[in-house]
Image (cartoon, rainbow, N blue to C red):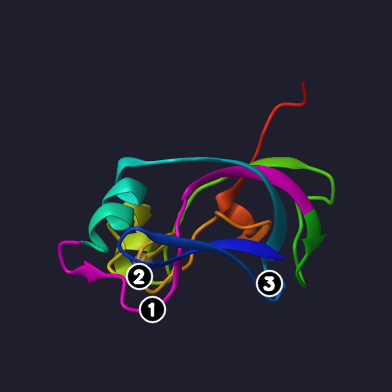
Amino acid sequence: MRAAVLRGAGDVALVEREAPRPGPGEVLVDVSSVGVCGSDVHYYEHGRIGRFVVDEPLVLGHEAAGVISALGEGVTGRHVGQRVSVEPGVPDRSCPRCLAGRYNLCPDVRFFATPPVDGAFAEQVVVHQAFAHPCPTP
Ligand SMILES: [Zn+2]
């Protein structure tokens, strides 16, 4: 698949990467659209935001939507062909904060397009099914 990779400040390249595969509980999403957030612009212009430094190639983009194209083992409640909005911050779902329902405070959240986690300026992304939110059919 193709992905837009930030290699350093002001340096984005379109590269071929191996397509991701959904693990247990995950879905593969064919990305159809991605917003450009201010944080993407900061990473592009400066190669960093605070303590988050782009020191390895990084795929930007965390405001994504698309269509599910494959299901990982054990996925229920999602189906191939389903339009979804991707919630970009995936917590560990096991720490005390997550289990108390405050997953937005999870200290181990993996956030798209924040080093070292790749984002969604790519043809496909993998996300846990609970963070692939179904969209209304037009
Ligand atoms: Zn957690």
Q: Position of residue 12 (x, y in %)?
A: 45, 60
Contact (CB < 8 A) between labels 1 and 2? yes
Crowding near pointer 3: few (<14 within 10 Å), some, many (20+)?
few
- Looking at numbered disc 3 in the image, what kind of residue is underneath it? Pro
User: Which residue is under mark 3?
Assistant: 20
Kindly identify the residue that appears in the image at 60 percent across and 62 percent down: 3
- Looking at numbered disc 1 in the image, what kind of residue is underneath it? Glu
Is 65 a magenta residue? Answer: yes
Is 20 a magenta residue? Answer: no
Q: CA distance from mark 2 to mark 3?
A: 18 Å
Position of residue 81 relative to residue 58, above or below, is above
Secondary structure found at label 1: loop
**Picture quadrant of ligand 1:** bottom left
Please name whichever residue, 66 or 95, is drawn nearer the observer in this view of the structure.
66
User: Which residue is under mark 2?
Assistant: 115
Location of the N terminus by quadrant is bottom right
- Looking at numbered disc 2 in the image, what kind of residue is underneath it? Pro
Q: CA distance from mark 3 to mark 1?
A: 18 Å
Residue 105 falls in image quadrant: bottom left
Per the rendered image, the range of residues in magenta is 49-68
